[in-house]
Image (spheres, grey):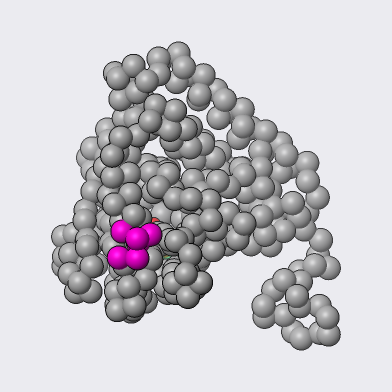
């Protein structure tokens, strides 16, 4: 499926936006400007970008603990995201969700999720609601290789298959679940093999190739939108940082890291654009400068905002101790 020139430039900008956001967030954690755990998406940008390019604004996504890239690709505002990470009131979840809980229903972002394997059943629920409301929306469910050993993965694929639900399961196989390599946590080579057990289509693509992801995702999205049911798209990739911001990832062989760095999806796309006359090197440098500025602005904005007030700590929290009129 052909991608228009302007669309490709937009995709480059999105990938670069995710990369700079994550690189800066990594620095901000190290400088203790922000706190907690940050699971960075750098290296995996082609997946969220290409998949979300196949979606409409009113389509849904479910996400993971490594969710910043999904939010940005689905149209999230980097200022509101950064404010959330800085625990400021103007963040997406009023500064109370943080990195692992960014949600925004206006953008169809059902939420990042700190519980591995929790996004799959959520996506089935969303897809069931689409089917019951008889709209042509779809739900994309992003998840990692490690989560495919959870019961929730199997239950969700089974139910989505049996009920023919409009959901696209997108596995971001970065070959590790924390420090455990995929070959030690499951015997299958490709996660997509598991589609056969639920009689749904399953494909494996190079997740660092934005075109390969786009083609596979578009086919699955169109199938779901046409009422033909779920698919499993496995995108093979590699994270540039450790599992989380404090992990130096010593368990990964240097040679393996070096091999994957050569397949970095961003220079790959830039190279393609230059080679095919879609953008000049100078234009690419202009795009990079534009994104650097945008993320710098997002950080200044976040730092200028007031903290989430302590008295609102229990507001909007489902587990609030019931106090008349407070928990809405
Ligand atoms: C139910 C549950 N079990 C364990 C954890 C701890 N945990 C956090 S991330 C992670 C690994 C996830 O690996 P994968 O699904 O491949 O995603 P990746 O981090 O590689 O993107 C684990 C085990 C958790 N958060 N939730
Ligand atoms: Mg993984």
Question: How many numbered marks, from 0 up?
Answer: 0
State the residue at coordinates (62%, 44%): 77
Looking at the image, which residue is at 49% across and 40% down?
18
User: Is the residue 124 above or below the residue 21 in the image?
Assistant: below
The residue at the point 40 percent across, 47 percent down is 54
Query: Which quadrant is home to the C terminus?
Result: bottom right
x and y percentages locating residue 196 in the rendered image: 17, 69
Q: Residue at x 34, y 30 (%)?
A: 269
Q: Quadrant of residue 257?
A: top left
The stretch in magenta equals 223-228
Q: Is residue 26 above or below residue 117?
A: above
Q: Quadrant of the N terminus?
A: top left
Measured as percent of width and height from the top left, residue 62 is found at: 47, 62
144 in magenta: no
Horizontal and vertical percent position of residue 305: 78, 46
**Res 23 seen here:** no
Front position in the image: 325 or 299:
325
The quarter of the picture where residue 181 lies is bottom left
């Amino acid at each position: 499926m052909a991608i228009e020139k302007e669309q490709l430039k937009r995709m480059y900008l999105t990938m670069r936006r995710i990369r700079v956001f994550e690189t800066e967030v990594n620095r901000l954690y190290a400088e203790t400007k922000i706190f907690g755990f940050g699971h960075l998406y750098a290296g995996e940008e082609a997946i969220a970008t290409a998949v979300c390019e196949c979606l409409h604004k009113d389509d849904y996504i479910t996400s993971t603990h490594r969710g910043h890239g999904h939010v940005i690709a689905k149209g999230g505002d980097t200022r509101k995201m950064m404010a959330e990470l800085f625990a400021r009131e103007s963040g997406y979840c009023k500064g109370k969700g943080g990195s692992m809980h960014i949600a925004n229903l206006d953008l169809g972002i059902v939420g990042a999720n700190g519980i591995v394997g929790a996004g799959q059943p959520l996506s089935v629920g969303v897809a069931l609601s689409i089917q019951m409301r008889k709209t042509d929306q779809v739900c994309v469910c992003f998840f990692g290789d490690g989560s495919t050993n959870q019961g929730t993965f199997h239950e969700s694929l089974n139910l989505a298959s049996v009920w023919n639900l409009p959901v696209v399961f997108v596995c971001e196989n970065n070959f590790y679940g924390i420090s455990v390599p995929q070959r030690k946590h499951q015997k299958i080579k490709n996660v997509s093999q598991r589609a056969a057990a639920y009689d749904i289509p399953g494909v494996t693509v190079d997740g660092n190739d934005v075109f390969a992801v786009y083609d596979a995702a578009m086919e699955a999205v169109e199938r779901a939108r046409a009422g033909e049911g779920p698919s499993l798209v496995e995108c093979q990739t590699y994270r540039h940082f450790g599992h989380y911001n404090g992990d130096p990832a010593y368990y990964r062989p240097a040679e393996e890291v070096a091999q994957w760095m050569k397949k970095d999806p961003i220079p790959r796309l830039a190279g393609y654009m230059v080679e095919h006359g879609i953008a000049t090197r100078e234009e690419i440098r202009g795009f990079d400068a534009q994104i650097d500025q945008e993320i710098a602005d997002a950080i200044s904005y976040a730092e200028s905002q007031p903290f989430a007030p302590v008295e609102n700590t229990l507001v909007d929290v489902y587990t609030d101790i019931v106090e008349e009129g407070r928990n809405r």
